[in-house]
Amino acid sequence: MNSHNLTSAQLNGILSIADDAIICVDNRHRIILFNQGAERIFGWTAAEAYGADLNELLPQRYHASHRTHIDNFDRSGQSARRMGERRAIFALRKDGSEFPAEASISRLEADDGAIYTVILRDISTRKAYERELQEARDKAEAATQAKSMFLANMSHEIRTPLNAVIGMTSLLLNTPVDDEQRDYAETIRASGEVLLTLLNDILDYSKIEIGKLETERQPFDLRRCIEESLDLLSSEASQKNLNFAYFIEDGVPASLMGDVTRVRQVLVNLLSNSIKFTHHGEVVVLVSSTRIDDERHEIRFAVKDSGIGIPADRLGDLFQAFTQVDASTTRKYGGTGLGLAISKRLTEIMGGRMWVESAVGTGSTFYFTITAAAASPVLAENVLQESASALRGKHVLIVDDNATNRRILVKQALLWGMIPAALASGIEALDLLRHGHAFDVAILDMSMPEMDGMALAREIRKHRDANALPLVMLTSVAHRPDDTGMQEIRFAAYLNKPIKPAALFDVLLHAMQIQPLVAGKEKPHAARGRMAESLPLNILVAEDNTVNQKVVQQLLAHLGYRADVVANGVEVLDALERQAYDVVLMDVQMPEMDGLEATRRLRARFGSSGPRIIAMTANAMPGDREKCLAAGMDAYVSKPIELDDVSGVLTAIAPAHRANKADGNTMPVIDQRRIDQLLELQDEDNPTLAADIMQLFVQDAPTHLDSIARAITEGDATLLKTASHRFLSGIENLGAMRMRGPCMALERLGLEGSMQGAHALQLQLQLQQEFENARAYLQKLVGAD
């Protein structure tokens, strides 16, 4: 015997100390070995177990399968290793009680036949622990869900009366009140909106906690997403005289597949915090990307500020819900700490993460990433490059004390082939000009120490007139000089911060007289702000996302409107029961009750006397428009929503008794911007393109009007839908704004098949009259007969 071979006594000793049950049976399934572990687990003594059938240790339900397993093994000749795989079973003690176990069986060949060895482990304790763990997990999840449902329900119950308070305050502000009363009412409304924002955060947090927050996957423009986020807060940054900017690194995809609303929500939360805790300096968004594979990119955002900073020992608490850096922060700056907790969870849902670097007195940088596929191969920094040949080789002088702004302007100028010279002060700029350096255009920052932009411009004008050196003033809305300064120094244009490449491009072309500046791009026409005066409307916005609410409210504010906001269809119905609204801007996808169902109920409740309803859709997919119109909506706009979209659709679908009050500036017969676009398309090959399209519209319109009239007379809903839809296409192409509303309403009647009564006839007559107005306008414009 080899020195390493075990004696029988040694083997028995090993078997006796094993915790597991080790049982051997012969080829008739009779027990021939039963170790102490088996005695302890099963309650049988070895003497009692010898000669017993192995099935006596198993519940009745396992007997047949056990024998089948052994027989199949014998026939197939599987290896002992394969047979030795552990299986979860229930075993039977001597007292008849069952217990969970793991068992493996191995087969050994002997002189008198096969011997099967069963190694069995009692896992009762482990299973009990797992069961307790699962119960604890279930209780924790139930508690979390109950807490979140409580928060959601309470938020909803509070929102309902709060919406009433804000809505009634809006009505009060539209009545004659003295200055003191107006101040009180404004305070009530502002406080209500702050509370509403808090409730929206709680709702978002509760949705995340119970896994009910869903994200979309749609293509979106990254630069536009960032610029819209900055626009929402630019006024606050400007009031604190903070430099507000963004910078996108080379190689970042221009378009991404993802949820633009949630990305914008995170950006706005971080930017809002940075502005709140920064008293001087800047707040900057930096964007870079890393390719993960052929399709996906990791997009990294950094929101960097020069604020008060955060102590190192408090960084770990930042992303906890309802947590602030310390109590004094809460007292001084307000807030609940929910914003960062929500933002962190949102980035995780979008396949990313969030972290922060900070130093007290220096500032903070909040980072977050998302994982997204590129929706377009175009790079963000190359969007305008193809049309930049007019700027190539031009010398541009950049004067700004802020290094971030200089970096942005220099990079953009180089991208367009320009030759930039960037300086940090007016004194340096004057010295350069005195030495005879020539420039085609100069960009001057308004707010600089020692010598500001206005003072520098006056000095420049002593040596260079407006033709020799066009000047562009880089400024914020809050610190823009009055028109006197513009006339005195003859600035070519103002460029608002944050710097946007498209606006910079247009301003440079205009300043060097390469092309005229498109009206309204840098200085919105004053008529927009007066729209609410000439076309007064009570407007309700239905949108569940807080950032989108702010976007729409801001757009309406630019038009002079103060809108009330609700978060779902149920709240829309509640609001309409409390007070009358002329227009509802309705998001289609909302919780509790979506926009389509809310519209159906409004139409059933109020009929045609109810408010005009404008759908706000995330993307204009085929069939979306028909669904909106079929539900009873009057029009729709696609997100992301532009100011022109809002003003155009409001004038088009506003109730007739209000629209009649609108002057020509607010509600033109033909949208001049569309005419200008047609004129821009003219070239040597098509010198009369715009006039030809106008004349074709005038010639074809009577045919469409006749088809609509015949459809109404014959009660043919299909013909009405088809004829109105075809006519609407031409109306929108030409920008015949007053015709759009009645034509869309007729198309909706055709979709609904509801042509009873005088409503269709009234719309037809209104459409006919608006066409006569449009025809007269076009004939004057092109001299057509």
Image (cartoon, grey):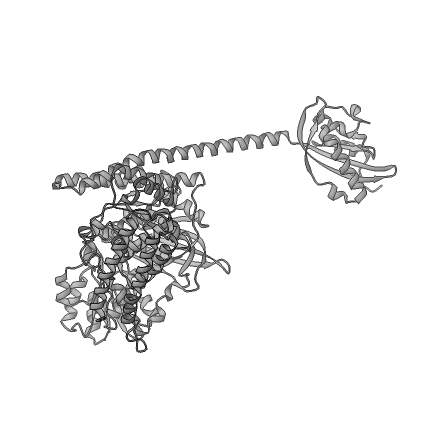
Q: Can residue 336 be seen in this view?
A: no
Residue at image position (47%, 34%) is 141
**Left or right placement of residue 98 versus residue 561 in this view:** right
- How many numbered discs, if any? 0
Which one is nearer the viewer's eye here, 11 or 253?
253
In what quadrant of the picture does the N terminus appear?
top right
Residue lying at the far bottom in this picture: please name it: 684
Residue 517 occupies quadrant = bottom left
Residue 202 image position (x, y, % from top left):
36, 38
In what quadrant of the picture does the C terminus appear?
bottom left
Q: Answer above or below: position of 594 versus 680.
A: above
Residue 410 occupies quadrant = bottom left
Residue at image position (79%, 36%) is 116
Q: Can residue 627 be seen in this view?
A: yes
Residue lying at the far right in this picture: please name it: 112
**Left or right placement of residue 428 versus residue 6 in this view:** left
Which one is nearer the viewer's eye here, 333 or 69?
69
**Left or right placement of residue 403 versus residue 142 in this view:** left
Residue 161 image position (x, y, % from top left):
28, 34
Residue 84 image position (x, y, % from top left):
73, 40
Residue 42 image position (x, y, % from top left):
71, 26
Residue lying at the far front in this picture: please name it: 714
